[in-house]
Amino acid sequence: MLFNSLDFAVFLPVVFVVYWFIVNKNLKLQNLFIVCVSYLFYGWWDWRFLSLILFSTLVDYAVGIALSKQDNSYKRKLLLWISVLVNLGFLGFFKYYNFFLDNFVAAFSFFGTDIHVRSLNIILPVGISFYTFQTLSYTIDVYRRQLEPTRNFISFAAFVSFFPQLVAGPIERASNLLPQFYVKRQFNSKLAIDGLRQIVWGVFKKVVIADNCAQFANDIFNNYTDYSSSTLVLGVFYFAFQIYGDFSGYSDIAIGTSKLFGFDLKQNFATPYFSRDIAEFWRRWHISLSTWFRDYVYIPLGGSRGTKTNQIRNVFIIFIVSGFWHGANWTFIVWGALNALYFLPLLLNNKNRVHTNVVAEDKVLPSVKELLQILITFSLTLFAWIFFRAENVEKAFLYIKRIFKFSIQITDRLSLERFAFELLPLIGLLILIEWFSRQKEHPLINTKYPTLFTVFIVLLIVLFGSFSNIQEFIYFQF
Amino acid sequence: MKVFFKQVIVVLVSLYILLVLLDLVYTQIYEKPIHARSKVAWLRNLEPNQQFDYALFGSSRVFFHLNPEQIKRETGLSGVNLGYPGSNNFEIKLMVKEFLKKQHSKKIFIQVDEQYNKEYSNVMAIIPWMPYIKEDLVYNEIKSVDSAAFFKRFVPFYRYMIYDSKLGFREMMLSFFKANKFESTNGFAPIIGQMRGDKSYRISIEDLKNKQLEDVIAICEKEKIELYFFTAPYYNTQFNAEVLQGQLPNYQDFSGEIPDRDCFNDFTHLNKKGAEKFTSLFGSTYFKN
């Protein structure tokens, strides 16, 4: 079920009413209801893969309890590995099986040996990368004795399958979300109103910004050989705002929806395009994934401690693995490696934590230096997005090669007939609104006239939303 | 909870008011545009009570193929090209009805082709009618082929949202300052292009009556208008025109009349050169005796 679908527009109010008016008397009932509607939400897409979620839930629940009873470090490690192998096994099979197979065959053929192995027609279960990481974090935290394992299966099942963030995150930590299932939720008007406004803001980013940008970005990337350098740059620019609007919009809708049900999820995006360097960008983009990799991969590897060689190795591992998490394609690996290259100079010069506060804090405008830093970081990000978006690495390089022909052709994309003349001002408006709310979780919170502002955003959605070209959320495929 | 529901109601009521206002504004602009961007809007804004010698109806195979200005030069007769891309028999009927509301013509020509058996609306060709769905004539027709017609008529602004790429903000704004390409040519616009490839095609239609076209025949009989059907040229295509010969009055088959490859943009559409040739042929067939 898509957040931007009619199905969800019916599903959400019905679930809201039942949740607060019928099953609100009892915590168990509240949690059981959340499990049921979450499974319904997921099953709406493909009920067959519900068994995967259920199996993953059962394994991690059992491993958690077994870990709490086990003091033998060898056996504890074994239990942890069971959970890791089951979860990553599913992920590996559904997401990476064909990729490894194809590359294995290609490698053999490169060395002169032809082997014939048939690849499988595998459907990637929606959200598998997200809920797998969420349950894994639970087991790892329990293994590290940072979290008490739950003995309440319904609460744990609700934590794993919680519908607002099941298919595309934010990847919640058990330490934040699970305890919220232990207490009966009381309706909190302030939280719910805030959630409603955050949903409106998320829909704006998705339907107005992302889906409109998608039409142009898709056309330009799919037919890049027909276009001039100026148009190709415009194509990457559109893609940058497509993916930002799409994913941060999804996160806002997910977090807002959770607030309607009395839950508080972690912020997933914090105006990343205002970052002054790549390190700051990665602290502000897909925060739940970045912090997951930081806590469960980067720090255990040694992080920024140890020899320079180890530091460099760790940076490459974290970025390449993070890239690979997005999909079984070399483009994501190159995208990850490119970000590692951007990040490395900062780390080696101990400048990776220079910008931990928000840019131009408590000021209206940034300084010239800050503005330049933002523009440079954004340009580097744009360049990396080419690899993320391109069909394959070869096409990404060809796209870049055409950009460096420096041809300008106004008519191919900037002519009135074909160019969405309202789109660039809308992106400008998004930037402006986000700039003035960069110290807040979302722009519609704590404003002077929140209702009026919300209605204004609704007006923009109605006027400029792309309703005839509804796109699936990009991160569903990851 | 009360505070929350109050907030929801405020947003929903504001939304409803906005939708009603926007619907009024958009509909008014499409009713009286500075530049009519669609054939339907253009027809509705033609000077009323004109007496044409003929009117042409059909799809892109009329729009791109027959030039009333050329016919006027060659025969002295005045006509109008009311074909537009995607228009099927259903839209042709709507267009004929709309035309006869305010205009007069001695003869009506309708192009029929491989779409002959279709009785439902075309998803793209129906869109230009949407701003006018509140009119009973348009609504009653669309209702017969579109189960969502009720929502499109009664939910304010809904039709402009779901057809945003064709009727949304961009198109609405363009109607202020961007003329269409057929305004100065009485409805004709040529295709500039050259056919690639050289395949042969085969089109087969079923020997059945078409309800929409039967309605048009009845309308023309009632209004005492001479009605002609024809099939425009195809490239290298076998077409069972004898079916149409049996089903439609005054039918003429031009499907194989232009064999030159350089007259086509693709196998169903003539280019500018082909349109000139076909217009001459059409004029000499119907008007020079």
Image (tube, rainbow, N blue to C red):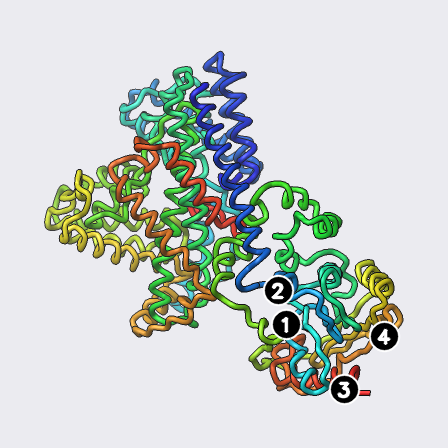
Q: Are marks 1 and 3 in contact (CB under 8 Å)?
A: no
Compared to A390, does A120 lie above or below? above
Q: Amino acid at mark 2?
A: Trp
> Under tag 4, what secondary structure?
loop
Q: Residue B54 in the image: x percent, y percent?
A: 75, 74
How far separated are the C-alphas under marks 2 and 3? 28 Å
Q: Chain of mark 1?
A: B
Q: Nearer the viewer, residue A101 or A468?
A: A468
Nearer to us: label 4 or label 1: 1
Q: Are marks 2 and 3 in contact (CB under 8 Å)?
A: no
How far separated are the C-alphas under marks 2 and 4? 28 Å
Q: Nearer the viewer, residue A425 or B253?
A: A425
Could you tell me if residue A82 is visible in this image? Answer: no
Q: Amino acid at mark 1?
A: Gly
Residue with the mark numbered 2: B42
How far separated are the C-alphas under marks 1 and 3? 20 Å
How far separated are the C-alphas under marks 4 and 1? 24 Å
Residue with the mark numbered 1: B187
Q: Are marks 1 and 2 in contact (CB under 8 Å)?
A: yes
Q: Earlier in the sequence, mark 3 or mark 4?
A: 4
Residue with the mark numbered 3: B284
Residue most toward the top? A25
